[in-house]
Image (cartoon, grey):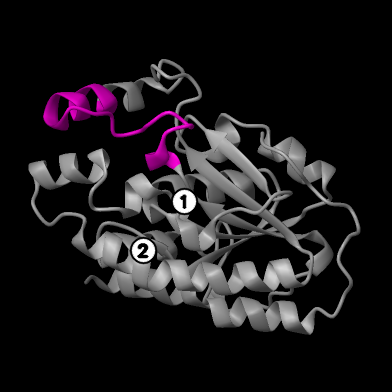
Amino acid sequence: MSIAHDKYVALQRRRNATLLALDRRTTALVIVDMQEYFLNPASPFSRACERVVPGVLGHFQERGRGVVEPSLRRLLDFFRAHGLRIVYTTVASELPDGRDLMPIFQQRNAANRAAVGDVAIPPRADAWARIVATLEPRPGELVVNKTTYGTFNSTGLDHALRSLGIASLVVGGVVTNVCVETTARDAADRGYEVVLLDDGCAAFSPEINEATLLSFQGPFGRVRRTDEVLALLERADVSPSPRAGTGAV
């Protein structure tokens, strides 16, 4: 590594270490795209990736199931126990033929269909589009479906969050350097305080995961581990907002 990189890392770490406080009344947990077709090796998405480069999803799916799911589940349990806001995102087509997806996704679906006989990004009603069972949404928890990488670009999430009085987001899920990062950066640009979960995200390699987290901290928000976020929320001894959010956007 260059001296310039070492200095940049030092700067980012200093930025990331600045004081952070979370208000329970205005903080939401955002769980990004923890869907079967990403995390299940039997999905058409997984099978097509494996056909191109065997083993490419090994690290990603192992971390997703073994690290990210348990971390998000701990936060989910805390947010539910204290009546705090929870938002799930999914990426899937609203139309059965997938024509509402952005062109990049439509092209990927065509290539996936040619490779394994099925699309990579399924319709919203498809079983492969479901959120994994350990994190399954409960009635009354907000689920937003997007047709782009970033959640804010193809949903009404911004309007919903502002209506609910949300100012801070704790964000985790998959894939770190794609939908998670795009959603988190867009949130920062819209004025939200954003915390990315160090042990709550997964990418196809540890290197790209770490590079994404390093790049995010400072200009866009903070990076914290699940234990740190829970400690911040425990210290924020404030009753949650009485309003309850429901439905899908």
- Among numbered discs 1 and 2, the one appearing first in the sequence: 2
Closer to us: 63 or 214: 63
Real-space Cα separation, disc 1 to disc 2, in angstroms: 16 Å
Q: Find residue 193 and report its image quarter.
A: bottom right
Q: Please give left or right for residue 58 compared with residue 209 in the image.
A: left
Q: Please give left or right for residue 169 compared with residue 201 in the image.
A: right
Task: Note whether 205 is above or below 49 in the view shown.
Answer: below
Disc 2 element: helix
Residue type at numbered disc 1: Glu
Identify the residue under disc 2.
64
Disc 1 element: helix
* Tag nearer the camera, 1 or 2: 2
Q: Quick one: label 2, few (<14), some, or many (20+) residues within 10 Å?
A: many
Q: Give the range drawn in magenta.
A: 108-129
Task: Note whether 225 is above or below 246 in the view shown.
Answer: below
Residue 155 in percent (x, y) is at: 61, 31
Task: Note whether 106 is above or below 213 in the view shown.
Answer: above
Identify the residue under disc 1.
181
